Image (cartoon, rainbow, N blue to C red):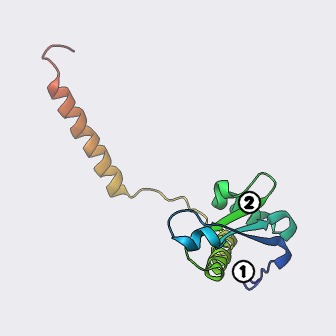
């Protein structure tokens, strides 16, 4: 499965299990296992270190302690559409982790913004000083 032009993941790292969906749905929901539980083993996929670290942050609690990413899809009534949805969500998560964050460049505030901030501080201090009782200094 191709994630980015440089990165492909092995299908053997993906395991899908079909379970019954929760919630309303009539007789169909009680008979057919349409929900998909996709399990992606990040250790078996041999992801690059930086991508794995970004994936840890993005996945949150969907990533288990042993490095298995679990995605549950039960949005649709058909098994095939839920399977495609789960795979698409996995691809989106991996693509988001594959893009490196833009480095932050330190900038200085403009002279005008510094002047406005200091003038505002002076006005606030003067307003508070005016509230005090006379002769309390």
Instruction: Give the SS element for disc 2.
Output: helix
Location of residue 51 in the rendering, given as x and y in whole percent from the top left corner: 74, 67
Question: Can residue 87 be seen here?
Answer: yes
Q: Nearer the viewer, residue 103 or 75?
A: 75
Location of residue 96 in the rendering, given as x and y in whole percent from the top left corner: 63, 71
Neighbor class of circle 2 (other Cα within 10 Å; few <14, some 14-19, many 20+) is few
Would residue 10 be found to the left or right of residue 103 on screen?
A: right
Res 47 → quadrant: bottom right
- Residue bearing the label numbered 1: 3
Which residue lies most toward the bottom here?
5
- Residue bearing the label numbered 2: 53
Quadrant of the image for the N terminus? Answer: bottom right
In whole angstroms, how far apart are the C-alphas of marks 1 and 2? Answer: 17 Å
Q: Earlier in the sequence, mark 1 or mark 2?
A: 1
Question: Are dots 1 and 2 in contact, CB under 8 Å?
Answer: no
Q: Which mark is residue 104?
A: none
- At 15% across and 28% down in the image, what residue appears? 130
Residue 38 vertical position relative to residue 66 in the rendered view, above or below: below
Location of residue 88 in the rendering, given as x and y in whole percent from the top left corner: 64, 78
Residue 87 vertical position relative to residue 133 in the rendered view, above or below: below
Question: Can residue 46 be seen here?
Answer: no
Would residue 44 be found to the left or right of residue 83 on screen?
A: right
- At 25% across and 38% down in the image, what residue appears? 122
Quadrant of the image for the C terminus? Answer: top left
- At 15% across and 13% down in the image, what residue appears? 135
Would residue 105 be found to the left or right of residue 136 on screen?
A: right
Q: Nearer the viewer, residue 104 or 32?
A: 32
1 vs 2, front mark? 1
Which residue lies most toward the left here?
134
Instruction: Give the SS element for disc 1.
Output: loop
Res 9 → quadrant: bottom right
């Amino acid at each position: 499965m191709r994630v980015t032009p440089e990165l492909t993941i092995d299908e053997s790292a993906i395991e899908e299990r079909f379970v019954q969906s929760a919630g309303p749905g009539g007789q169909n929901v009680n008979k057919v296992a349409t929900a998909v539980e996709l399990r992606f083993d990040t250790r078996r996929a041999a992801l690059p270190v930086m991508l794995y670290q970004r994936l840890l942050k993005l996945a949150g609690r969907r990533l288990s302690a042993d490095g298995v990413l679990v995605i549950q899809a039960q949005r649709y009534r058909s098994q095939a559409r839920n399977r495609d949805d789960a795979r698409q969500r996995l691809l989106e998560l991996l693509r988001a982790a594959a893009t490196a964050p833009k480095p932050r460049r330190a900038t200085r505030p403009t002279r005008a913004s510094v002047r406005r901030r200091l003038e505002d501080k002076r006005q606030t201090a003067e307003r508070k000083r005016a509230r005090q009782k006379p002769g309390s200094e």
